[in-house]
Amino acid sequence: MKKFMTIAAMFAAVMVSFSSCNKDNGDDTGKTPATQTCPDCGEALEDCTCGEFESAIKIDGDFADWAAVTPVTATCNPDAKWTALTTLKVYTDEMYIHIYFEFSEDEIVDLAWVPFHVYINQDNNTEGCGDDQWIGQGGQDWLLEGAVIAETFCSYNPGMFAYDESVINPDTGAPAGDGDLATIDWAWADVLPEGSGIASGAGNGNKYELSIMKEMMAGMELAETFGLGVDIQQSWNSVGVLPNTAIADDNANGAAPMLQVPAVM
């Protein structure tokens, strides 16, 4: 009898254990639970393919994979105003904006903190927009700001900002912009803080590559072709800008149009 009771107890324990391994539907009402969705693409988890996506560009400081894609490119005009950036390549896919650049080590000498900016004109609107580093720059919509070198190469993990003429200048308490896109104002509203994980990067020698995750760029709606420009700085002053052109009497900054980038290549 004692043996039978022991076996019965073991059987009950196994059944309890088995029941605890069953998938819990989340409620005890008998209702079908809500479908779980992927936070990135919004598809049902069983239909999501995010984890299956593999980009042609891997951010690892080995740039050989750029030979397998056809990016849009810009090179530095020798008579430009800011010449520290020598080459720019941009490639896009469904998930990322990939950027590769080369810089002059003779001009990037202060390695304590080397800022790098990515400017995006999402709809390519330049009508009535002023020029500065690029023609029609007043049409800019987004800015990414972060470092690519902090003593040594570091991953690019920038803050993201939206161009907003009404943003308040903390020093004056007044709007940073004048509401006129014909003039270029430093009028950027915080969207994502530095360190959000929106991008990553790696460098080697005088070369650097980075990838920006499109889906983390909250509010960004890229046109079929969008404008993009980059700059690199020393002590928070631009020393390299691409695209560029030669300076002239009527173009003191050597401003060129932003690079024209297909949203997906």
Image (cartoon, grey):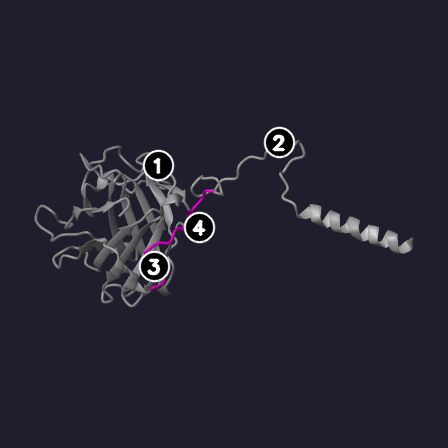
Which residue is disc 4 drawn over? 51
Is 4 situated above or below 67?
above
Alpha carbon separation for disc pair 3 and 2:
52 Å
Q: Position of residue 90 (x, y in %)?
A: 26, 52
Q: Position of residue 132 (x, y in %)?
A: 19, 45
Q: Secondary structure at mark 2?
A: loop
- Of discs 3 and 2, which sits in the foreground? 2
- Of discs 2 and 1, which sits in the foreground? 2
Q: Which mark is residue 31?
A: 2
Magenta highlight on residue 53: yes
Magenta highlight on residue 98: no
Alpha carbon separation for disc pair 2 and 4:
30 Å
Q: Secondary structure at mark 1?
A: loop
Residue drawn 29% across the image and 63% down it: 63
Which residue is disc 3 drawn over? 148
Which residue is disc 1 drawn over? 167
| Magenta segment main secondary structure | loop
Residue drawn 18% across the image and 42% down it: 131
Q: Where does the magenta region start and end? A: 47-61
Q: Amino acid at mark 2?
A: Lys
- Of discs 4 and 1, which sits in the foreground? 4
In the image, taking residue 166 as reference, residue 131 lies left or right, namely left
Residue sitting nearer the eye, 8 or 120:
8
In the image, taking residue 148 as reference, residue 29 lies left or right, namely right
Is 221 situated above or below 208?
above
